[in-house]
Image: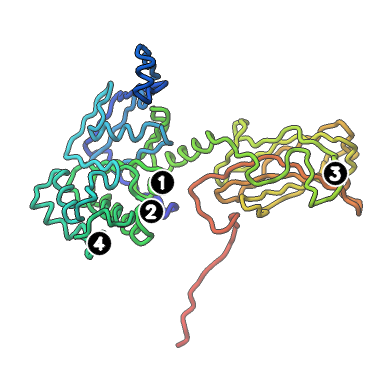
């Protein structure tokens, strides 16, 4: 979806609008078999074997309200329960406990293209799906021209869908969806359809729906869409609501949850193991230091593997000297996933009264904050240890510290964000 992630959704006060969706204490569980009988032979050999199950709590006490005219977003990682929630709202699943109250005519769009008959033409499918959505045959036929025109498929409406490309199918499905005359629309992962120009048309339609006061519940992984369209949003994890409120706060919580749960990939960027020497950099160099520990931490002092864009990089590391390091220099480099050096900085011992020597067996600890101007992405921090920075024959050893992720919605051209104080003015032409 072509949207501007930096643009805030216009604040709308819908607190006085009536509640049209009310969900209280919603619970839904599934029994997952621990083993399956794959053939008649297995059943014959083990006729008395009982199938054992484990309980999966997809939803475990969900509560929320949606008001009339509200664009409400539901986000969550895969397996969090958001699609199960949408299917209960659409009456596809029955809840185990809790209640759902809904006021108004509902149009669920759980997946684009569901219900299409690929042996029928677009013309016949449009009419059939219109009838399935509650329209009369006459009203469905009357909307045919608008559907195919928006989908840009006027020349292909008598072509069977089995001869359509995937892009043509999603354009037709989306076009049919927006023609539904419903009070409440439930939409699941349908924003990124078609090419760039058609995505912009879809964005325009959602803006029009929002401005027209349609009540829309949107399930998506697209945080820019949440910020662009939604009035409120909620984040589901493990069948529970873990964040609800402004779209920006929910989007930030979603991104943080994703990256907090992610294990840093090892050997992604092909750098050195701890204590190893890159032979093609300094041939025959002696090992002089060993990495003891290194990490980033958040403002509460907890170890993290990801940092939100703009937050400082709070670095901690300990390096053990395997031989005397006289006036050592520690050079840090931050490289991106393409091995491009993005930025770097130097550090010396710099302790007043110190003899500027790290004796063999001693450990040097480096900690502090680094200004973070990195754009979202994955990075690797390395440290190059120079045994004596003041000699002409410098002995340098590289240590891989750790990989980390910068996350956030802000988009900045390039690899880092630059500060600039500029002015612009228009001068009138003499002519």
CA distance for labels 3 and 2? 51 Å
| Mark 3 residue element | loop
For the residue pair 12 and 261, the one nearer the viewer reads as: 261
Dot 3 and dot 2 residues touching (CB under 8 Å): no
Select label 4 or label 2 by which is in front.
4
Q: What x and y, as percent, mark residue 395?
A: 87, 48
CA distance for labels 4 and 2? 20 Å
Q: Is residue 422 left or right of residue 349?
A: left
Q: Which mark is residue 222?
A: 1
| Mark 4 residue element | loop
Inspect this view and state whether residue 4 appears. yes
Select label 4 or label 3 by which is in front.
4
Residue at (38% x, 18% y) in the render = 53
Dot 3 and dot 1 residues touching (CB under 8 Å): no
CA distance for labels 1 and 4? 27 Å
**In the picture shown, does residue 297 fall above or below 56?**
below
Dot 2 and dot 1 residues touching (CB under 8 Å): yes
Can you identify the residue that label 2 sits on?
1
Residue at (36% x, 23% y) in the render = 60
């Amino acid at each position: 979806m072509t949207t501007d992630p930096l643009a805030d959704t216009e604040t709308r006060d819908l607190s006085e609008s009536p509640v049209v969706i009310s969900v209280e204490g919603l619970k839904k569980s599934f029994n997952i078999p621990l083993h399956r009988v794959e053939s008649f032979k297995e059943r014959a050999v083990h006729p008395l074997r009982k199938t054992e199950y484990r309980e999966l709590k997809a939803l475990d006490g969900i509560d929320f309200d949606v008001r009339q005219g509200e664009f409400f977003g539901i986000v969550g990682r895969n397996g969090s329960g958001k699609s199960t929630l949408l299917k209960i709202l659409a009456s596809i699943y029955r809840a185990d406990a809790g209640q759902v109250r809904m006021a108004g005519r509902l149009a669920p769009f759980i997946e684009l293209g569901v219900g299409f008959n690929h042996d029928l033409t677009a013309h016949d499918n449009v009419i059939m799906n219109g009838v399935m959505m509650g329209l009369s045959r006459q009203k469905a036929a009357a909307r045919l021209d608008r559907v195919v025109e928006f989908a840009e498929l006027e020349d292909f409406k008598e072509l069977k869908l089995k001869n359509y490309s995937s892009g043509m199918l999603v354009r037709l499905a989306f076009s049919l969806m927006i023609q539904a005359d419903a009070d409440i629309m439930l939409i699941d992962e349908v924003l990124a359809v078609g090419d760039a120009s058609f995505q912009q048309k879809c964005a325009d339609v959602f803006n029009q729906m929002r401005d027209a006061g349609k009540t829309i519940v949107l399930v998506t992984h697209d945080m820019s869409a949440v910020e662009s369209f939604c009035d409120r949003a909620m984040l589901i994890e493990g069948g529970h609501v873990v964040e609800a409120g402004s779209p920006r706060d929910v989007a930030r919580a979603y991104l943080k949850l994703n990256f907090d749960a992610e294990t840093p990939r090892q050997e992604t960027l092909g750098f050195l193991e701890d204590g190893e020497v890159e032979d093609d950099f300094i041939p025959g160099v002696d090992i002089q230091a060993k990495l003891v520990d290194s990490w980033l931490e958040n403002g509460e002092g907890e170890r993290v593997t990801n940092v939100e864009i703009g937050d400082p990089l709070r670095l901690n590391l300990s390096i053990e000297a395997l031989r005397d390091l006289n006036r050592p220099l520690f050079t840090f480099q931050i490289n991106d996933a393409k091995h491009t050096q993005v930025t770097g900085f130097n550090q010396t011992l710099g302790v007043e009264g110190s003899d500027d020597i790290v004796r063999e067996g001693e450990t040097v600890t480096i900690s502090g904050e680094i200004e973070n101007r990195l754009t979202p992405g994955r990075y690797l921090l390395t440290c190059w240890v120079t045994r004596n920075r003041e000699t002409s024959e410098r002995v340098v050893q590289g240590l891989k510290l750790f990989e980390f992720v910068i996350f956030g919605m802000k988009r900045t051209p390039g690899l880092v964000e630059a500060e600039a104080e500029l002015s612009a003015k228009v001068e009138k032409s003499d002519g």
